Image: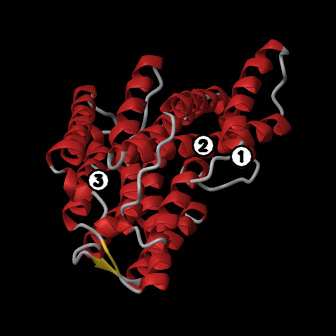
Amino acid sequence: MRLTVFAYLFPLASLGLAILGPVFALPFSGRLAGVETFLLIGSCFAAVHHAEAISSRIGQPFGTLILTLSVTVIEVSVLVAMMLNGENNPTVAREAVLSTVMFVCTGIVGACLLLGALRHREQEVRQQGVNGYLSVIIAISVLCLLLPEATNSGLRGSYNNFQVAFIMVGTVVLYGAFLFMQTVRHRDHFLPDEREEEAPVRRPLWLHVPCLLAALAGIVALSSGVAAGVEEGLDRLGLADPDAVVGAVVVAMLLLPETITAIRAARNNELQRSINTALGSALATIGLTMPAMVAVSNLVGRPLILGIDPEDRIQLLLVLVLSIVSFGTGRTNALNGIVHLVLFAIYVMTLFVP
């Protein structure tokens, strides 16, 4: 991976604007929000750049964990800023988590399978590793997005705080158990094939670790301005379900670096690395972002709505079942990618025409 000056300029520019904005009392405007959004996206790419550099030094799968956890920090900061911006936005967390699962399991996975198959006809993945991802994603998706509305308190239009807290603790335990299996107990299930392994690139950690932290700090600092700009821009469109579109736009923006990384790996016939990146981002989001958002909502006194709409339930269950089938044999082809991408297109359509 080539080093680029932009990987260092974007974090510095983001931190600089975040510091100088309050000092010079810059008023909020669409132009300023646009600049902040541009810098935030650039800092996302910079964070992924430095996370990948660290990954090449410490090896897989720990490198993939650094990448996915970095994206989780980014997403939580932006979602918290959106929740705290203006009036309470109780559905922002569920919409973002749902969008992440749908974007990853249909859009990103579909693009990786299709583009990889067009170049290599068929590709292979380690079934044990993929099954590990999918089992935890399925469990947490149902627990966080479906179960709260199906309990007695949920059916009455309110949530039992103990139930929600217990579910969130369960999701963190599931994610922690997965991390242990991925990095310690069954590490070989998630490693690429020998033909996919690349020679480790030795780069100084003292350079990339501070830059990664600076990029994440810049993203957190700019997230409030970006959240206000995104919400204001979408409000002008008069959408039928603006919260769903806002969540999808944020997810698409923040997952762009991982999307490029996963597609590039698939085209290089590194499907295992591609799936690690794609499903890892979805799992980290639903396993960490939702509990973090619930904790923040309780601290600031802004309640969240966790249950999803009926059409979203059908699509969520459909894509979870499809994911099991697509990776059931350990070999994928272009048809698998086409099916995932068709479901992705239908999901995007329902965002604008619910």
Q: Which residue is mark 2?
A: 44
Front label number (2 vs 1)? 2
x then y, percent, for residue 58: 37, 41
User: Does residue 233 appear left or right of residue 192 in this picture?
Assistant: right
Q: What mark, if any, has residue 235 been given in the picture?
A: 1
- 119, 162: nearer the viewer: 119
User: Does residue 155 appear left or right of residue 259 in this picture?
Assistant: left
- How many numbered circles does the render carry? 3
x then y, percent, for residue 79: 53, 36
x then y, percent, for residue 277: 41, 55
User: Does residue 75 appear left or right of residue 157 in this picture?
Assistant: right
Query: What's the amino acid at mark 1?
Result: Asp
Q: Quadrant of the C terminus?
A: bottom right
Residue 43 visible in image: yes
Of the image marks 1 and 3, the number of the one nearer the N terminus? 3
Front label number (2 vs 3)? 2
Q: How is the image coloured?
A: secondary structure
Q: Secondary structure at mark 3?
A: helix
- Identify whether 141 is placed above or below 148: below
Front label number (1 vs 3)? 3
Q: From mark 2 to mark 3, how far is it between C-alphas? A: 24 Å
Is mark 2 in CB contact (under 8 Å) with mark 1?
A: no
Q: What mark, if any, has residue 137 been given in the picture?
A: 3
